Image (cartoon, grey):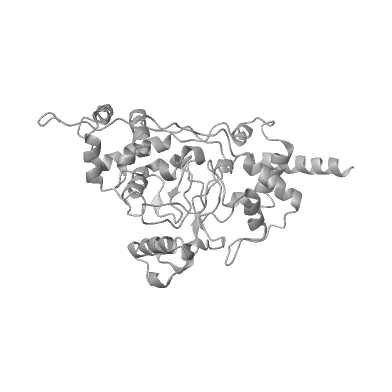
Amino acid sequence: MKPRNFRRAALAVALAGLATAGIGADLAPLPEPKFNAAQAEMGKFLFFDERLSGDAALSCATCHDPQKGWGDGMPLSKAYPASEYFRNSPTLLNSGFKKRFMWDGRLDGADMGTLVRDMITEAHTMNMDGRLMQERLKQVPEYNEMWQKFRKDDINGMRVFNVVGEFVKTLVSKNAPIDKFLKGDQNALNGTQQEGYALFKGKANCVACHNGPTGSDGMLHKTGVPENPAITAEPLRHITMARHYSTSGMPNYMNTHVDVGSYAITKNPKDKGKFATPSLRDLKYTAPYMHNGMFKTLDEVVEFYNKGGGAGSELRPLNLGDSEKRALVAFLESLSGDPVTVDKPRLPAYKARVFGKN
């Protein structure tokens, strides 16, 4: 048998084995999102409205830009003026299906409102007082009209967070080849991508941590990603990290100069260096990768895992050849669909309220 034919035959056997095991049992098509349409419509306006930040200069879209895969395209995110952030801004796509939020996994994925509250009220993100936010929004007649479509009371700061969260739930990947393949279209992935899929579930065993509709187990793992030097080289980032540790109650935080991940939350030494498994969806649009943006390309990511990760990693070397690494990258790209974009709506203006008729 010729080498090329042998390779095809081996691939066919591998895929047949996956089929008998239940192809798609580990990676799954995205379900239909569930959200309140009236709240999501108002949430779209609020997501882009800078008046939700303390200085009225930042919006959710500042760090989660529709044109940049709903992240910001930078290794480490920006932050509220006079501070800088110490982690990468992850995409918001498919957040409605996540098990945990934040790189250190500190928030429950079922509570989108708390995620939004943290981002809006935290001093290093949008630095907004919820009481001030609600009074600003009450000064906009159009927002009051939108609010009345789903509630009959005044705009309330705590409930505004849920409204923004309903919009975030609408941000779902679309037309990804992998979804078509998992639903039975065998031509949705080409031969190289199918070879990569076999590696993903077999030799490379990526599926051990990257599974389910988003390609994430929602768990925390230590892979030994190298530290981003900017965290210590740039004082504003280091200050933000130290503040995060302090407010999380982490012991001896002033003597810690690396990102300890989940340990700051759990205080369990076993969790040092553990971070949440990221989604594999729409990787074409969400570079750079990892919690600190240390890898610019998928080739770098695959090479990192092929070596078994970095210092203290719980991973093992994969021993993939060059063609196998290329096939794996090709498969990972098949988890990206059409760009999901939303244009910034025209934001309504403040108007004076009439005393006694509010």
List x then y, in percent, for residue 315. Answer: 61, 60
List x then y, in percent, for residue 149. Answer: 27, 26
List x then y, in percent, for residue 224. Answer: 56, 62
What residue is rendered at 44% in x and 60% in y? 262
Q: How many marks?
A: 0
Left or right relative to 267: residue 208: right
The one of 350 and 113 positioned closer to us in this rendering: 350
User: Is the residue 289 above or below the residue 5 in the image?
Assistant: below
Left or right relative to 139: residue 47: right
Identify the image quadrant of the N terminus.
top right
What residue is rendered at 46% in x and 42% in y? 92
Quarter-of-image position of residue 95:
top left
What residue is rendered at 41% in x and 38% in y? 168
User: Is the residue 55 above or below the residue 350 in the image?
Assistant: below
List x then y, in percent, for residue 140. Answer: 24, 32
**Is residue 271 something that shows in the picture?**
no
The one of 179 and 229 positioned closer to us in this rendering: 229
Residue found farthest to the left: 356
User: Is the residue 79 above or below the residue 61 in the image?
Assistant: below
**Is residue 230 something that shows in the picture?**
yes
Identify the image quadrant of the C terminus.
top left
User: Is the residue 325 above or below the residue 281 in the image?
Assistant: below
